[in-house]
Amino acid sequence: MWTKCPESGEMVFVKELKKNLMVVPVSGYHFPLPAPDRILSLVDHGTFEEFDGSIRSGDPLKFKGVASYADKLEQNREKTKLEDAVVSGIGKMDGRLVSLAVMDFRFLGGSMGSVVGEKITRAIERGLERNIPVIVVSASGGARMYEGILSLMQMAKTSAALAKLAKAKIPFFSVLTNPTMAGVMASYASLGDVIIAEPKALIGFAGRRVIKETTRADLPEGFQTSEFLLEHGLIDQIVERHDLRDRLISLMNHLANHLQAKSAPATKKAVSQKSPPAKKTTRKRNPAKKG
């Protein structure tokens, strides 16, 4: 019924926390938000249509451990009511169609396996096919090692799809939440035309302990937080969760209006109604005026 804010130690009523999009009212601490709730907070009511919801991960390595990979997948499906760590589809934001993919940290730490990479890639390709902006909300601990090299291949696959999107001049908005780490941050999460992060989110590649042991140096205060990365130019904006929808709509109004102009039927109609060029006529000479 109650949960403790990691930042202030304040006890918060869980129902109130859920109503506030998992943001602690006093301290402003952002708890992870489930993908379905995130989608509802972003898109116009009743406009979201999920795609690729039936894709399921295989077990290519037949991984065995304390629990097998197959068992872990089933446990996480039952816990989250999701098929994998991302939900993707098409919806409207302020009446504008967008291709949206939202990761869910509850499912195996939001790890990127072959299904996550495939669904992110398809979301990007839908934006390319339909000439609409693409938004990906990331929350991940990195690549899913239960699938070995197949999980690492998703870094190249998603990045290649984004290269095609950039060539078509279709904007891609990357939203980083707490945490966004490792292979996800090293691929599509860091390739946005605009990169937005939530306040005090943990963002980076390797963990703090690994970096400290490798460099043998003391790391600066706030290292790998949104605020530190904004100061050093890796991200573009820090936006609170309640303001995220309005900020994305504003950015799309600036960066995606050319997409509407390119596909608007009114433009084609105006071209088709253009007057044909005037025919050249040969003027007859008047014999009375001759000489």
Image: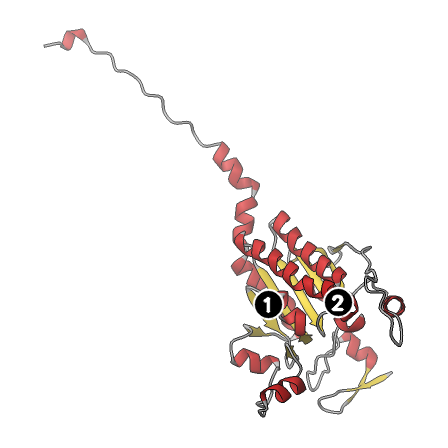
Q: Are marks 1 and 2 in contact (CB under 8 Å)?
A: no
Q: Is residue 33 left or right of residue 175?
A: right
Q: Which residue occupies the extreme left position in the image?
A: 291
Q: Which mark is residue 2?
A: none
Q: In this figure, which residue is indicated by the disc labeled 2? A: 148
Between the C-alphas of marks 1 and 2, the distance is: 37 Å
User: Residue at the location (56% across, 44% down)?
Assistant: 264
In the displayed structure, 45 sits above or below 208; it is above
- Viewer-closest of 59 and 258: 59
User: Residue at the location (42% across, 27% down)?
Assistant: 276
Measured from the top left, where is residue 148 in percent x and y? 75, 67
- Mark 1: secondary structure: helix
Q: Label 2 sits on what residue type?
A: Gly
Observer able to see residue 17: yes
- Viewer-closest of 51 and 271: 51
User: Residue at the location (65% across, 52% down)?
Assistant: 125
Q: Label 1 sits on what residue type?
A: Arg
Q: Which residue occupies the extreme top position in the image?
A: 287
Measured from the top left, where is residue 82 in percent x and y? 83, 64
- Viewer-closest of 113 and 279: 113
Measured from the top left, where is residue 91 in percent x and y? 70, 55
Measured from the top left, where is residue 110 in percent x and y? 75, 70
* Residue 274 location, quadrant: top left
Observer able to see residue 96: no
In the displayed structure, 233 sits above or below 168; it is below
Here the colouring is secondary structure
